[in-house]
Amino acid sequence: MDVTAQHGLYHGIVSGLLADYAHCIDGDDLESWPALFTDTATYRITTAFNHAQGLPIGIIDARNRNMMEDRITALRKANIYEPQRYRHIISVVRLIDAADVASDIIQAEASFIVVRTTIDGSQDLFVSGRYLDEVDISGARPLFAKKLVVLDSDKIDTLLAIPL
Amino acid sequence: MDVTAQHGLYHGIVSGLLADYAHCIDGDDLESWPALFTDTATYRITTAFNHAQGLPIGIIDARNRNMMEDRITALRKANIYEPQRYRHIISVVRLIDAADVASDIIQAEASFIVVRTTIDGSQDLFVSGRYLDEVDISGARPLFAKKLVVLDSDKIDTLLAIPL
Amino acid sequence: MDVTAQHGLYHGIVSGLLADYAHCIDGDDLESWPALFTDTATYRITTAFNHAQGLPIGIIDARNRNMMEDRITALRKANIYEPQRYRHIISVVRLIDAADVASDIIQAEASFIVVRTTIDGSQDLFVSGRYLDEVDISGARPLFAKKLVVLDSDKIDTLLAIPL
């Protein structure tokens, strides 16, 4: 397969994984969310300001999949999140260094927004930002090896306990 | 073609059909909209609440393509919709059971929002939701064999006479 | 490669180029933006109303890449734009006349919104519209040969000095 065809294929792979990811959150199937990551994957949410300054502490900072599973368990036990619905809209995917076809890691970026629907039916733009991802394609199915969520606004809702 | 390449191909096919679909509505080319469906296709709009409860009645419930054509004809005759503009933004596509390469039906899901622009130029988030689609790829061009539109909010605008 | 596979490939190519394009603007890397166009490419921003009326004057009307570079230089010197952040969300891509596999030009269309985040952290829907693009794939990397940005609303923010 030539580089261009590989690029087209990678585009579909990353898009599909991102869609699966959003489906877990928007469909309140949070228990399936960690399974989209490798064992040693990191998952962090930060803000554009913090990211640009190189500040180390994010809003969520999971250093492996176990920590992601713990977060979901804690969320369910605490029952802390409101009965609101989320809807991720993810933009067309940008592949970074896609010419490196020998690697098992695809580096990709995608912009997104999340729309929130509250129980009374009102809707608003909850957050916007971008994903900086590393996708491991060495196994039977693609998995996130690293996911960094960079939010555009520094004003973060205190309800932000779920993954984004 | 191996399953992964098939997956990449299917991703492009479904994305393109969804883009054609949105183009018919946003470009006010509603007459071309039923042609994206098979003769026996169903098209229904419902809400997340009704869908989760298994309630049978949707906002629109077309049981074949003729019913879709009738709706467009009625819309044009009644001239009931306001001179507002719609803009669909459709997220990356999720393929369901994409491993089943032998079938002529692709099952797919995609989240979307619709932004509305009124004649005075103001804009708002009109609806958000997801498409649950079956795409028939047995013919010369892909067509929807089934399309279920599940809206996130139960507060539905009474203007909702057009397809979404 | 058959037409269907070509279609899937083109879909990935155009999606990737659009993602690169948005990345230049949203990441404030405006200097890299003209490099996504051919030397003789045109870039114009107009409104749906003007476009439908065939009115010749757009908001931005660059008739080659030099004019795009000049605009960025002027923007940087004038320092006229506010410290706000933009986020493009681009919908699934529609290929036009994709069956014409012999051509080096892909005609494509994509709907988009831009979300704006101001320095105080508030966010709003800045604009919505669609891209009408011609993508030249004859060279080592795909480039825009023509890009027409059609905004849905006629109420244009006077800050609209940057590309969209």
Image (spheres, coloured by chain):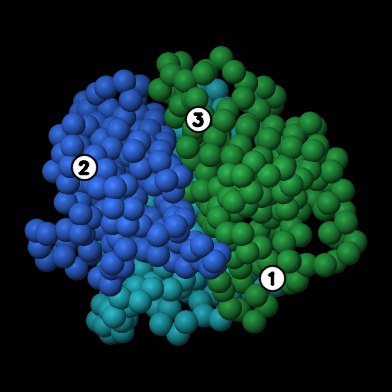
Chain colours: A blue, B green, C cyan
Looking at the rendered structure, the kind of residue marked 3 is Ile
Residue beneath disc 2: A70
Where does residue B88 sit, x and y in percent of width and height?
58, 56
Residue at the (78%, 67%) spot, across then down: B81
Q: CA distance from mark 3 to mark 1?
A: 34 Å
3 or 2: mark nearer the eye:
2
Where does residue C79 sit, x and y in percent of width and height?
26, 83
Q: Secondary structure at mark 2?
A: helix
Where does residue B116 sit, x and y in percent of width and height?
61, 68
Looking at the rendered structure, the kind of residue marked 1 is Gln
Q: In the image, is residue A156 above or below residue C79?
A: above
Chain to which mark 1 belongs: B
Where does residue C81 sit, x and y in percent of width and height?
32, 81
Residue beneath disc 1: B84
Residue B96 numbered mark, or none: 3
Give residue C150's quadrant in the image: bottom right
Is residue A71 visible in the rendered image? The answer is yes
